[in-house]
Amino acid sequence: LTLLNSGVSVAFSYVGRDFWSALSSKDTAEFYNMLVKFSAALVFGAPVSVLYRWQRERLAIAWREWMTNRVLGLYYSNKAYYSLERGGGGVEIDNPDQRLTEDVRSFTAYSLTLFL
């Protein structure tokens, strides 16, 4: 799906280039020809791009849910919250469970941006 989305982006690049070239050269026949090709690329490319984005967001939610459950499970398993509540280490941390979930959210979002 990633390769297909990249292919759609490349196709839009070429079609857009030819479309604007025909428009700037005031070639009416080529303009209408490229308008048809651009419309066809839009009809094919838009669903691919939307499907790619939807699948990526679905993966992000599933990964974030799994990772949040894992991190919070580790946090609660050894009663680490006791140490944090009592100011273990001399530093008081406000809302550690919320911070953990926000860290997981930002980690998964940036990782998916990097790899997909």
Image (cartoon, helix red, strand yellow):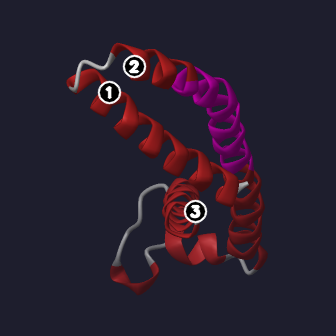
Nearer-N-terminus badge (1/2): 1
Q: Is residue 14 left or right of residue 73?
A: left
Where, quadrant-wise, is the C terminus in this rendering?
A: bottom right
The answer to the question of whether label 2 and label 3 lie on touching residues, with beta carbons closer than 8 A, is no
Give me the disc on residue 22: 1
Q: Observer-nearest residue: 7 or 74? A: 7
User: Which residue is identified by label 3?
Assistant: 112
User: Which residue is identified by label 2?
Assistant: 31
Q: Is residue 82 left or right of residue 47?
A: left
Tell me the amino acid under the disc marked 2.
Phe
Assign the magenta stretch its main secondary structure: helix
> Label 1 crowding class (10 Å Cα cut-off): few <14, some 14-19, many 20+?
some
**Highlighted range, magenta:** 37-58
Give me the disc on residue 37: none
The residue drawn where x is 69% and y is 31% is: 44
User: Residue 18 at what x, y percent from top left?
Assistant: 38, 36
> Label 3 crowding class (10 Å Cα cut-off): few <14, some 14-19, many 20+?
some
Nearer-N-terminus badge (2/3): 2
Nearer-N-terminus badge (3/1): 1
> Label 2 crowding class (10 Å Cα cut-off): few <14, some 14-19, many 20+?
some
Whether residue 36 appears in magenta in the rendering, the answer is: no
Where, quadrant-wise, is the N terminus in this rendering?
A: bottom right
Which marked residue is nearer to the observer: mark 2 or mark 3? 2
Q: CA distance from mark 2 to mark 3?
A: 39 Å
The answer to the question of whether label 3 and label 1 lie on touching residues, with beta carbons closer than 8 A, is no
Residue lying furthest bottom: 89
Q: Observer-nearest residue: 82 or 18? A: 18
Q: CA distance from mark 3 to mark 1?
A: 38 Å
Secondary element under disc 2, as helix, strand or loop, is helix
| Position above or below: 16 against 4 | above
